[in-house]
Image (cartoon, helix red, strand yellow):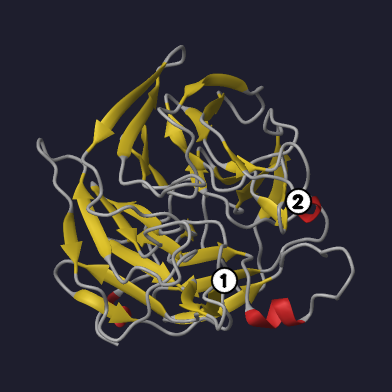
């Protein structure tokens, strides 16, 4: 495939190593989020050397299974060091969750998201100076987007897929890019890969100047007009000079896996996610067993996938959660450990040096 053979296994990030066959990162937990229920669909990134987590939604009164109401949050939490304690840093302009977030130049980028009534076009930079939280608006997205995915490549934020309204029965086949370093930034639309399904809950990644797009789920209306999901296993990458390139299909779907993917050398590592094969194993009329723990590693040099099994035990795997690089580790804050059930635990992944 064009360009694949030119990618070399090189340029490891300090403190990280390439994923080798059968290897797995060490998994541990940081201090739990100071919310007893935890939140799914948060925004996360790093500013002022600290981990920032914001927004999201949970069921604080009664569980979903008991008819509980989903409530969106505007709270922003900060963790100054991996061995530190959380504090509340401030508030978002409004309750918001299930948007795109990333770290850029010591700021946390947030874009899109929504609440129970509407999805949002807004975007902003959050900065933490050790004492105060600041909020700098960015240009609005061309359309409202929630449940999309995205990543920062260099100075460019990419946002792909998603849905325009909370009740949508179709997905967006659209991708937008914003140069965060431009004095007067403006979103530009990137043509969607020809013949490819739109998607929600996909996994993004940034590596070697490319924006990657993995899996997710398309939406279609059933006989009752309700949204049904079609799970996807295709993979793509994009950069302006080369356009979209198809990659090897994933062994199985990883919808709603934490996004963007972890980067270890020339490998992109995805933690868990949902597939039809997993859903088929769920017992009826029994408690949900939790989501898959296994990882998938994509070798950008060889255009191949490999399953990686992490050690048993430890904090539970989760979906609908962000993922961010922080110091020498990758962090997945909070998220959903079973349908409607969140966790305040914070997952930490560290690859052996």
Which quadrant of the view contains residue 78?
A: top right
- On the image, which quarter does residue 240 sit in? bottom left
> Residue at (29%, 64%) from the top-left corner?
210
Frontmost of labels 1 and 2 is 2
With 258 as the anchor, is 172 left or right in this view? left
Of the pair 326 and 212, the residue shown nearer to us: 212
Residue 278 percent location from the top left of the image: 71, 77
Judged from this view, the residue extending furthest toward the front is: 224
Which residue shows up at 47% across the image and 56% down it? 166
Disc on res. 291: none
Where residue 9 appears, as percent x and y from the top left, is 40, 68
Q: Secondary structure at mark 2?
A: loop
Near mark 1 (Cα within 10 A), the count class, few <14, some 14-19 or many ≥20, is many
Image coordinates for residue 198, horizontal then vertical, percent: 37, 74
In the displayed structure image, the side of residue 124 where residue 24 appears, left or right: right
Quickly name the residue at label 2: 67
Mark 1 highlights which residue?
254
Q: Is residue 106 visible?
A: no
Q: Rounded to the nearest whole Å, what is the CA distance between mark 1 and mark 2? A: 28 Å
Residue 332 to residue 301: above or below: above
Label 2: how many residues lie within 10 Å, few (<14), some (14-19) or many (20+)? few
Q: Is residue 39 left or right of residue 262?
A: right
Q: Nearer the viewer, residue 116 or 46?
A: 116
Asked if the residue under mark 2 is in contact with the one under mark 1, i.e. CB atoms within 8 Å, the reply is no
- 347 shown above or below 224: above
Q: Is 352 above or below relative to 34? A: below
Can residue 270 be seen in the rendering of this structure? yes
Q: Earlier in the sequence, mark 1 or mark 2?
A: 2
Residue 8: x and y, percent? 35, 71
């Amino acid at each position: 495939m064009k360009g694949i053979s030119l990618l070399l296994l090189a340029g490891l990030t300090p403190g990280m190593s390439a994923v080798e066959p059968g290897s797995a990162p060490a998994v541990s937990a940081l201090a739990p989020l100071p919310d007893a229920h935890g939140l799914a669909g948060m925004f996360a990134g790093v500013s002022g050397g600290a981990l920032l987590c914001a927004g999201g939604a949970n069921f604080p009164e009664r569980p979903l299974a008991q008819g509980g109401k989903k409530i969106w949050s505007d709270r922003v939490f900060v963790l100054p060091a991996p061995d530190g304690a959380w504090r509340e840093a401030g508030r978002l302009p409004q309750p918001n969750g299930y948007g795109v977030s990333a770290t850029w130049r010591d700021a946390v980028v947030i874009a899109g998201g929504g609440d129970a009534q509407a999805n949002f076009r807004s975007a902003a930079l959050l900065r933490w100076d050790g004492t105060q939280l600041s909020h700098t608006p960015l240009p609005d997205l061309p359309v409202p987007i929630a449940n999309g995915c995205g990543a920062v490549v260099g100075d460019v934020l990419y946002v792909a897929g998603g849905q325009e309204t909370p009740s949508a029965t179709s997905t967006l086949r659209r991708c937008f890019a914003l140069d965060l370093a431009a004095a007067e930034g403006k979103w530009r639309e990137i043509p969607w890969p020809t013949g490819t399904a739109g998607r929600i809950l996909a996994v993004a990644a940034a590596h070697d100047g490319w924006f990657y797009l993995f899996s997710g789920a398309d939406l279609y209306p059933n006989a009752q007009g309700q949204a049904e999901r079609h799970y996807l296993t295709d993979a793509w990458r994009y950069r302006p000079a080369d356009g979209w390139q198809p990659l090897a299909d994933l062994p199985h779907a990883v919808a709603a896996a934490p996004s963007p993917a972890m980067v270890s050398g020339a490998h992109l590592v995805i933690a868990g996610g949902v597939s039809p094969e997993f859903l088929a194993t769920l017992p009826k009329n029994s408690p949900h067993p939790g989501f898959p723990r296994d990882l998938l590693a994509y070798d950008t040099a060889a255009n191949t996938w490999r399953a990686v099994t992490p050690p048993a035990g430890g904090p539970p795997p989760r979906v609908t959660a962000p993922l961010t690089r922080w110091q020498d580790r990758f962090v997945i804050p909070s998220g959903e450990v079973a349908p409607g059930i969140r966790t305040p635990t914070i997952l930490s992944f560290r690859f052996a040096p």
